[in-house]
Every structure is written in C-alpha cells, then in structure tokens.
Image (cartoon, rainbow, N blue to C red):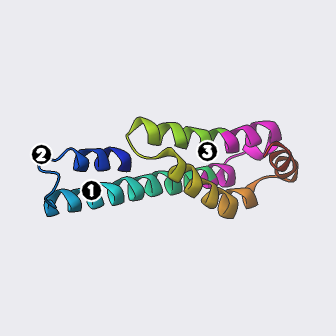
Amino acid sequence: MKLTRAIEKYSGVANRNAFDLKQFFTCIYNFFAVFFGAFLMGSSMGCFTALITKYTYIRQHSTLETALFILMSYSTFLAAEATGLTGIVSVLFCGIFQAHYTYNNLSKDSKLQTKEVV
C-alpha cells in the first residue's frame, strides 16, 4: 500500500469533521512500512550485485557485467512495484549501494561502459 492510498483511505472516513487518531497512526505506519520495505529491498539488491561482481568471474565479460549492473537496478524497481512498495525509493537505495560497493568491483572496461550508458 502506497502513501497515497493510505491518505485516500483516511479521507474516506465516515465523519469527515472528526479526527480519527487510529486511522492517522495507521497512515503513518503504512508510510514507514512501505519506505523501509523499499529501503531493505533496494539495499539488499545493491549488496547482492556487489557480491556477484566481486566473487564471480563475470569481470572477464565487461559487456555482461555492465548489463548486470543496470538490469539489477531495474529489476529492483519492478520487484518493489510488484510487492506494493515504492519502486523509486528502492532504486534510489540500490543505486546508492551500487555506487558505493558494486562500482568498485567492476573491471576498468565495465566502469567506462557503465559511465557511458548512465
């Protein structure tokens, strides 16, 4: 459930003049659940990509390594949207983790190709 749906639920309360504290905290809970779920999904995918590029022989194939780098980011977006989380937040944190960890594990050719593609 995304934040906009939580707000729509809150606005659909029968008595619009009354403040429903339970519904308000439900909205806050939903927001943080979606945010931290997307954070965990993005950061775990970023770390997973870093482990793949560090402990496999994929660096011998620079084009494949670049494609993996980009497709893992996109698959994070798709997985987050499919599970009801926000894809933008998951891609943001996946990119942060990939920039910090995965990029340093890439071969020189892959670093150059990744910069050109991005």
Between 3 and 15, the one lying in front of the other is: 15
Above or below: residue 35 compared with residue 68: below
**Label disc, if present, on residue 88 of the rendered structure:** none
Residue where numbered disc 2 is placed = 14
The residue positioned 69% from the left and 59% from the top of the image is 99
Region in magenta: 50-70
Q: Earlier in the sequence, mark 1 or mark 2?
A: 2
Classify 10 Å Cα crowding around label 2: few (below 14), some (14-19), many (20 and above). few
Classify 10 Å Cα crowding around label 1: few (below 14), some (14-19), many (20 and above). many
Q: Nearer the viewer, mark 3 or mark 1?
A: 1
Q: Are marks 2 and 3 in contact (CB under 8 Å)?
A: no
The residue positioned 17% from the left and 51% from the top of the image is 16
For mark 1, give the secondary structure: helix
Residue 86 coordinates in the image, percent (x, y): 45, 47
**Label disc, if present, on residue 73 of the rendered structure:** 3
Residue 64 part of the magenta segment:
yes
The residue positioned 87% from the left and 53% from the top of the image is 108
Q: Amino acid at mark 1?
A: Cys
Residue where numbered disc 1 is placed = 27
